[in-house]
Image: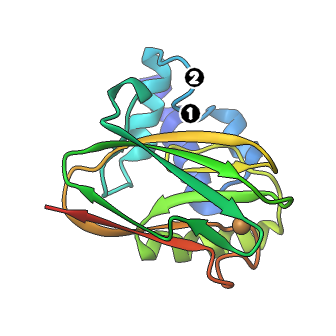
Amino acid sequence: MRRTTIGLAAITILVLAGCRSDAADVTTIPTTSRPMTDESMGDMDDHAEDLTFGEPVDASQADRVIEIAAKDDFTFTPASITITAGEVVTFRVTNEGALTHDFTLGDAELQDAHDLEMAEMAGMMMEDEPNAFMIESGKTKEMTWHFDEATELLIGCHIPGHYANGMKATITVES
Ligand SMILES: [Cu+2]
């Protein structure tokens, strides 16, 4: 019970404060690259409750890998991706620019909300979340996601100014 209470409190802080790293100190949000303990899975489930477009899963379950490049001209390459509902996809994202970029998976509403939060943080580094991470210049990070139903999603970069400059890619999940 105690862990559940702490988890809910952490989620509330995250929702109110966006991606503040001090909130993440309360409950470390796991990435798919970390080992899955019962506790980290529980926390991931708590946080993923708000996400309506599938769920993060372990990289070993991936049906395929999609390589994505993030660049300083505010583009993701490829700019559009088609996925079939039910697929598990690993996004392998390489920052080919000199700037830090962000990779956030979500629908348009989530992207808009996240962009406001990141603007308020004025470029602070944030902890990885199940559906979002920051990537430093030259680095590669992975996210593995189970897409469970047909929908229209976006990948967005929310380093202040980048999303407004068009740093996004579309994901069409077909039935
Ligand atoms: Cu960017």
Q: Residue at x 28, y 50 (%)?
A: 147
Q: Amino acid at mark 2?
A: Arg
- Circle 1 sits on which residue? 31
Secondary structure category for the residue under label 1: loop
Q: Residue at x 63, y 73 (%)?
A: 115
Q: Residue at x 19, y 46 (%)?
A: 86
Q: Label 2: few (<14), some or many (≥20) within 10 Å? A: few
- Mark linked to residue 34: 2
Instruction: Say whether marks 2 and 1 touch (CB < 8 Å).
Output: yes
The x and y percentages for residue 21 are 75, 46
Mark 2 and mark 1: span between their CA atoms? 6 Å
Secondary structure category for the residue under label 2: loop
Q: Residue furthest right?
A: 98
Q: Label 1: few (<14), some or many (≥20) within 10 Å? A: many
Q: Is residue 118 left or right of residue 152?
A: right
- 127 or 96: nearer the eye? 96
Q: In the displayed structure, would residue 135 be above or below residue 32? A: below
Q: Ligand 1 appears in which quadrant? A: bottom right
Q: Amino acid at mark 1?
A: Thr
